[in-house]
Image: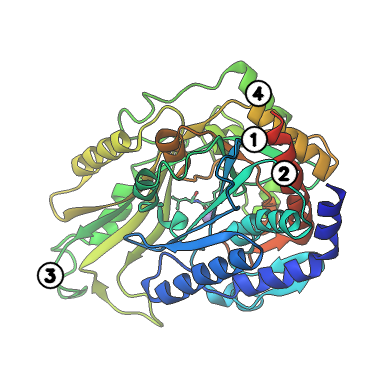
Amino acid sequence: MQAVLDYLKANEPRFIRELCDYVRFPSVSAQSHHRPDTEAAARWLVDHCESIGLKASLCKTAGNPVVIARTARAGSSTKPRFLVYGHYDVQPAEPLELWKTPPFEPRIEGRSLFARGASDNKGQHLAHLNAVEAYLKTGTELPCELTFVVEGEEEVGSKNLAPFLRKNRTDLRCDAIVISDTGIPDLKHPALTYALRGIVALEVKLAGPSRDLHSGIYGGTVDNPAMALCRLLAQLRDKNGRITVPGLYDDVAPLSAYERKQLARIPFDAAAYRRSLGVPKLFGERGFTPQEQRAARPTLEINGLTSGYQGEGSKTIIPAWASAKLTFRLVPNQSPEHIRKLVEKHLKRLCPPTVRLEIEGGHGGEPYLVSPTSPLAQAGLRALKAAFGHEPVLLREGGSIPIVTDFKKVLGADALMLGLALPDDNAHSPNEKFSLDAFAKGMRMSALLWQELAGC
Ligand code: BES
Ligand code: MN
């Protein structure tokens, strides 16, 4: 085992160079013009996996390909089998002018590597690949069989991965899924995440006149779709931060006194948090702490809002349409299909007769909650403690990884979520970065994890 850890240390500069190569691909799944770049990232990953001694393939789906890479299988092996999940797609980098250096030209400053996708999620799954490489290249026997499943559509809802899992369920059967795609409060508090929020995404469009109209000639006689949309959206959340969609809270699992106590133990400074985000005052559902609001309560956000003229100067028009991209975050036991129906019904009821409502269904994902005391979780906690040198904490996270519930349903396997992202990594924001210390500790954690998992 020492040989593995020594190998990781000795090869760190090369691992960093390889991460730089990986993040140079603008694999933005939301933007179709990046489709070739996204496929190139997948091909780079296949080549990389092959070069470290894994058997790798690029698997076609209806969307972006899935990369499968596995350790060589002895026919009669009775070793436990684990999947490692990650995603090579990234969020759009816009607004580009807010990046200190271009998003796909990696820059190292101190112990941080800046680039879109460095933290979410290329650096995190590369840490696991580096650990496997260390085993294979030092001739150290792995106590388990590993299959990497790295997809290219996580950031757009993973809709082609569930069918892929169903088709390959025999081949992919395993004892558990290991995922590093969540966060830690800081390097002194490594974390096991045992819950994620679910999601419902949709686009709401209000269509008015058949074309943009002169706002002087026609203004006063027809409704303005942008105005109507503002009014409609403003009604979706009240001043206490509660979503107004009837029935939305019906299935929400209440927080137990025990969980509230545990959440309150996570290091959190509300004033520092507020300052770090640059807001004059925090806002959230009344009656809950910020930790509770973002981990265990449903929310609604407008992710994008578009209408009318957005160019330089002014243009006096009544826009023909207005649209908004919305996402609801869900908690156990809310169902995305049911919530989507409730939302659509409510929007139809609120829509005034002066405009036409069009709802485009986006993606969805179920909330996830798993026991933090299982033998699996205990093994994860031991590996975290040994690699980081600090006692780990248990987290519920507000983000979503839509495929985790499909892993459970299709493969019957639980997810062990051991993330490496820091709160100031700027995931989904300009100037995303990954901590090279988290990278190094993550590789060690992965190397130690296979020993812990095989023994449990
Ligand atoms: N890595 C995140 C998920 C995450 C972030 C979980 C922080 C916990 C803490 C992932 O890449 C992500 O951003 N997922 C999307 C999914 C959506 C597009 C379906 C999300 O949560 O917005
Ligand atoms: Mn993400």
Disc on the earlier residue, 2 or 1: 2
Q: In front: 58, or 405?
A: 58
Nearest to viewer (mark 3 / mark 4): 4
Q: Secondary structure at mark 3?
A: loop
- Circle 2 is placed at which residue position? 185
Kindly indicate whether the residue at mark 1 contacts the one at mark 3 (C-beta within 8 angstroms): no
Q: Which mark is residue 395?
A: 1
Q: Secondary structure at mark 1?
A: strand
Residue found at x 72% / y 73%: 17
- Circle 4 is placed at which residue position? 373
Disc 3 crowd rating (10 Å Cα; few below 14, some 14-19, many 20+) is: few
Disc 3 versus disc 1: distance between alpha carbons? 50 Å
Q: In front: 407, or 7?
A: 7
Q: Which mark is residue 407?
A: none
Q: Is residue 318 above or below residue 84?
A: below
Disc 2 versus disc 1: distance between alpha carbons? 9 Å
Residue 246 in percent (x, y) is at 30, 30
Disc on the earlier residue, 4 or 2: 2
- Circle 3 is placed at which residue position? 210
Residue 78 in percent (x, y) is at 60, 35
Disc on the earlier residue, 3 or 4: 3
Q: Amino acid at mark 2?
A: Pro
